[in-house]
């Protein structure tokens, strides 16, 4: 079996052309910034998943699948730009963010341009459920940003609050990738539902691993400062787990918003606890659930999806 990169190379040439054409500079700074962000790299997980889903459907519909892939990558980029503004992030993928390089106005405009371009690319796709699914997902992504903002420094948030946030922040776009790729290629319902369940659990596992790496990862690999989630008041799964196990930590966490000097103490408490290992066990359970939904998927797509899942899980090893 050829490598995943080689298997998808012809598809990504077409997706790349669509994205570059949609972001032609034309003397507009927002276009330049959007193209710069696209060229900066990234895993391209979302377009990869939409293409793989499309490969299981009608081969005559692949041009629509390419539009989906380009659209979702642009949507993902838009969420990153807006995330950086909300989190006051200086770095993204190891490079200065649009927000820090060009300021608030240009960053907001760039994010809005990427979002509107993403929607425009797929405007002519004909499917009875496609556009409603896409528009509802965008609404959920925005509400997820608001939810994250509302729970900033909220030490009393529930696990349900946490899962709502990470679903809308991460898992939703991964689910959307396979679902829109399935709609665009007119894939059968049963296969689409299995892909959707796979994507949901992989998305949750992926974000929980990100939460762990915020404490244990290398800053060069992360492309952002360590401990930034905690420092910014975004309490992730390891934090919530320790909060419910350690009364001293729970008390310090409640005081953190008004006492930022507690950051180092909170970090030390988490690193010395078993919360990171427990979070990893929860991530692994989601991974196992994801894999269980691949049994009926045709080859070679099944093997490539398994490969993607294994690479995401091995980021901690």
Image: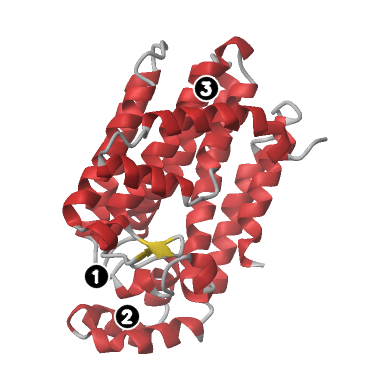
First in sequence: mark 2 vs mark 3: 3
- Per the image, the residue denoted by label 3 is 65
Among numbered discs 2 and 1, the one appearing first in the sequence:
1
Instruction: State left or right for residue 15 relative to residue 268.
Output: right
Q: Residue at left 33%, top 44%?
A: 32
Q: Earlier in the sequence, mark 1 or mark 3?
A: 3
Residue 251 in picture, x, y percent from top left: 28, 84
> In the structure shown, which secondary structural element does the residue marked by tag 2 occupy?
helix
* Residue 244 seen from this side: no
Q: Quadrant of the C terminus?
A: bottom right
Q: Residues within 10 Å of mark 1 (few under 14, many from 20)?
A: many
- Dot 3: what SS? helix
Would you name the residue on which mark 1 appears?
A: 153
Using the image, determine if residue 200 lies above or below residue 285: above
Q: Position of residue 273 (x, y in %)?
A: 50, 83
Given residues 157 and 130, the one toward you in this image is 130
Name the residue carrying label 2. 250
Looking at the rendered image, the disc whose residue lies closer to the viewer, 2 or 1, is: 1
Distance from Cα at disc 2 to Cα at disc 1: 12 Å
In the rendered image, residue 23, in percent from the top left (x then y), is placed at 36, 34
* Quadrant location, the N terminus: top right
Tell me if I can see residue 220 in this picture. Answer: yes
Q: Are marks 2 and 1 in contact (CB under 8 Å)?
A: no
Q: Nearer the viewer, mark 2 or mark 3?
A: 3
Q: Residues within 10 Å of mark 3 (few under 14, many from 20)?
A: many
- Left or right of 76: which side holds 4? right
Question: Which residue: 37% across, 38% down?
Answer: 75
């Amino acid at each position: 079996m050829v490598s995943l990169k080689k298997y998808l190379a012809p598809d990504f040439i077409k997706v790349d052309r669509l994205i570059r054409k949609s972001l032609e500079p034309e003397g507009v700074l927002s276009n330049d910034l959007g193209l710069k962000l696209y060229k900066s790299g990234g895993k391209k997980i979302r377009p990869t998943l939409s293409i793989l889903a499309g490969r299981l459907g009608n081969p005559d519909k692949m041009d629509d699948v390419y539009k989906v892939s380009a659209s979702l990558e642009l949507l993902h980029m838009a969420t990153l730009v807006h995330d950086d503004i909300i989190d006051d992030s200086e770095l993204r993928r190891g490079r200065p963010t649009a927000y820090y390089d060009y300021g608030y106005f240009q960053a907001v405009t760039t994010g809005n341009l990427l979002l509107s371009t993403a929607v425009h690319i797929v405007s002519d796709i004909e499917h009875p459920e496609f556009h409603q699914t896409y528009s509802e997902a965008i609404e959920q992504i925005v509400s997820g940003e608001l939810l994250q903002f509302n729970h900033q420094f909220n030490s009393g948030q529930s696990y349900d609050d946490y899962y709502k946030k990470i679903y809308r922040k991460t898992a939703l776009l991964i689910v959307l990738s396979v679902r829109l790729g399935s709609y665009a290629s007119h894939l059968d319902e049963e296969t689409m539902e299995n892909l959707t369940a796979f994507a949901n659990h992989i998305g949750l596992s992926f974000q929980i691993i990100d939460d762990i790496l915020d404490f244990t990862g290398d800053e060069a690999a992360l492309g952002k400062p360590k401990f930034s989630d905690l420092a910014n008041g975004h309490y992730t799964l390891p934090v919530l787990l320790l909060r419910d196990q350690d009364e001293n930590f729970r008390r310090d966490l409640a005081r953190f918003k008004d006492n930022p000097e507690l950051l180092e103490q909170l970090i030390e408490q988490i690193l010395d606890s078993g919360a990171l290992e427990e979070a990893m066990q929860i991530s692994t359970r989601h991974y196992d659930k994801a894999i269980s939904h691949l049994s009926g998927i045709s080859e070679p797509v099944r093997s490539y999806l398994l490969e993607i899942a294994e690479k995401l899980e091995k980021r901690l090893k």
